[in-house]
Image (cartoon, rainbow, N blue to C red):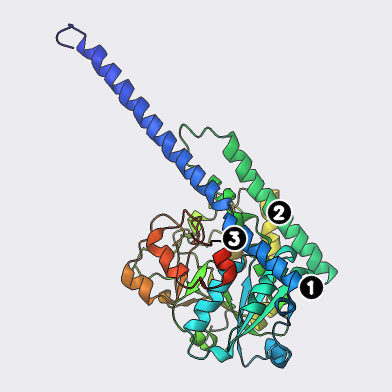
């Protein structure tokens, strides 16, 4: 600049413009990288496709893979309230196997456990084949497809309406994401939630119908398929919920002003007049993933009808009441019906890029929840915590080996 006698002011303006341009390119790259990361979470690894296909074939040709689950001598346990009943709603065979194997492995009395797996029609055959050929010595496993339920017309209509509204919510946010300019300005984190598979998952949304799925049970533990159990959880069934319907982690292990998950304001649009003003937007939202439900208290309440009421309000408001996902309408429907349990029952957020939970906390937690896009069976899963989940995969299984799962 000195040798060419250039104007210092012009040079400063040019330099500033260059720096601004570079900053815009960096921000654009970060936003696109975040979007691609979320898109990657929607994919199903080829190895998991292979596993389902191999197991479905085994179900067709091997009588053992079609054997009764549970065996006839254990059928009575399915409705016996003296046992500890655990419910999974999933279409992921590998994930279900990890949840059950980790729970049984760490149980003080595994013979008291009864697992109820509910899956969709396409996954029923491989799911049944897996647990029929990988039997547990002590615990009981039931695999049931949605096509095997004989629901009333009212329930069928309710499920259909629920799914239609959730699909509309996700489509609304997804379309807005595509119309937005990703290169400049705007926070797209909430729009990207619409890319999450859970946003459109039938199995995820059906949890509001657990009392109808299990009319003979009075208390169940619910586990998501993206959790791993590290300690005995039998004391869940002896917890006093003080008349509440659900026991859930609300307070955090990390101290005051620190939430184990997110705050209400991260889910709900408090600027909308329909959202109750008495809710504290800075209070911690309760965690799903590992909950204990009093189904008798649930049936006496109006939780499910309240859930549908909120869905219709969201539809009428143009989908502006909350961010896409399973939890927001549940937060509203279950308001006042949640009993806080010890924070170390569940440590969540392990499916995101960074977790504030240290090694000691992860080790002490009864359940680790990989909520977030980076599921442990995906390549984008965090290697630091992925091993906590993968050590419960049965790598000696011939189908796991043939399909090169997690290789």
**Which element is circle 2 on?**
helix
Where in the figure is residue 315, as x and y percent of width and height? 70, 51
The residue identified by callout 1 is 148
Q: Left or right: where does residue 116 sit relative to residue 104?
A: right
Residue that carries the numbered disc 3 in the rendered image? 48
Q: Residue at x 79, y 73 (%)?
A: 148
Q: Which mark is residue 165?
A: 2
- Return the residue nearer the eye: 216 or 140: 140
Quadrant position of the N terminus in the picture:
top left
* Residue 342 locus on image (x, y percent): 43, 78
Q: Residues within 10 Å of mark 3 (few under 14, many from 20)?
A: many
Residue nearer the viewer, 11 or 321: 11
Q: Residue 23: where, in percent of width, then height?
A: 35, 31
Above or below: residue 359 compared with residue 109:
above
Q: Is residue 157 visible?
A: yes
> Disc 2 to disc 1, how far (Cα)?
24 Å
Disc 2 or 1, which lies upstream in sequence? Answer: 1
Q: Residues within 10 Å of mark 2 (few under 14, many from 20)?
A: some
Q: What is the spatial separation of the Cα atoms under label 1 and label 3, in whole angstroms? A: 24 Å
Tag 3 or tag 1, which sits nearer the N-term?
A: 3
Q: Quadrant of residue 383?
A: bottom left
| Distance between the alpha carbons at the discs numbered 2 and 3 | 29 Å
Tag in front: 1 or 3: 3
Q: Residues within 10 Å of mark 1 (few under 14, many from 20)?
A: few
Q: Is label 2 or label 3 in front? A: 3
The number of discs equals 3
Residue 3 vs residue 168, the one in the foreground: 3
Q: Nearer the viewer, mark 2 or mark 1?
A: 1
Residue 348 position (above or below residue 364): above
- Helix, strand or loop for disc 3: helix
């Amino acid at each position: 600049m000195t040798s060419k006698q250039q104007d210092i002011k012009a040079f400063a303006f040019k330099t500033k413009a260059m720096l601004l341009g570079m900053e815009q390119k960096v921000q654009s790259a970060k936003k696109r990288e975040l979007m691609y990361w979320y898109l990657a979470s929607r994919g199903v690894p080829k190895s998991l496709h292979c596993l389902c296909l191999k197991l479905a074939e085994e179900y067709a040709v091997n009588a053992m893979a079609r054997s009764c689950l549970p065996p006839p001598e254990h059928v009575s346990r399915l409705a016996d309230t003296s046992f500890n009943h655990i419910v999974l709603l999933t279409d992921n065979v590998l994930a279900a196997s990890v949840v059950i194997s980790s729970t049984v492995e760490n149980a003080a009395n595994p013979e008291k456990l009864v697992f109820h797996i509910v899956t969709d029609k396409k996954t029923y055959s491989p799911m049944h084949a897996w647990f029929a050929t990988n039997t547990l010595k002590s615990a009981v496993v039931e695999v049931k497809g949605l096509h095997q339920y004989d629901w009333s017309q009212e329930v069928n209509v309710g499920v259909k309406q629920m799914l239609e509204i959730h699909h509309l919510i996700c489509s609304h946010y997804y379309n807005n994401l595509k119309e937005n300019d990703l290169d400049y300005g705007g926070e797209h984190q909430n729009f990207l939630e619409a890319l999450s598979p859970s946003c459109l998952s039938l199995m995820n949304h059906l949890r509001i119908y657990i009392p109808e799925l299990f009319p003979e049970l009075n208390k169940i533990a619910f586990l998501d398929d993206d959790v791993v159990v590290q300690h005995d959880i039998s004391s869940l069934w002896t917890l006093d919920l003080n008349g509440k319907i659900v026991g859930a982690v609300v307070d955090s292990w990390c101290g005051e002003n620190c939430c184990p998950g997110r705050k209400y304001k991260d889910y709900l649009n408090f600027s909308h007049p329909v959202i109750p003003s008495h809710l504290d937007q800075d209070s911690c939202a309760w965690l799903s993933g590992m909950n204990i439900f009093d189904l008798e208290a649930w049936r006496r309440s109006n939780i499910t009808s309240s859930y549908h009421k909120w869905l219709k309000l969201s539809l009428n408001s143009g989908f502006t009441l909350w961010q896409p996902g399973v939890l927001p309408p549940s937060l509203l429907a279950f308001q006042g019906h949640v009993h806080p349990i010890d924070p170390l029952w569940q440590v969540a957020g392990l499916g995101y890029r960074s977790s504030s939970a240290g090694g000691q906390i992860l080790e002490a937690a009864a359940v680790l929840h990989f909520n977030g896009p980076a599921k442990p069976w995906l390549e984008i899963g965090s290697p630091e915590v992925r091993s906590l989940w993968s050590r419960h995969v049965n790598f000696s299984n011939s189908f796991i080996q043939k399909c090169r799962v997690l290789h």
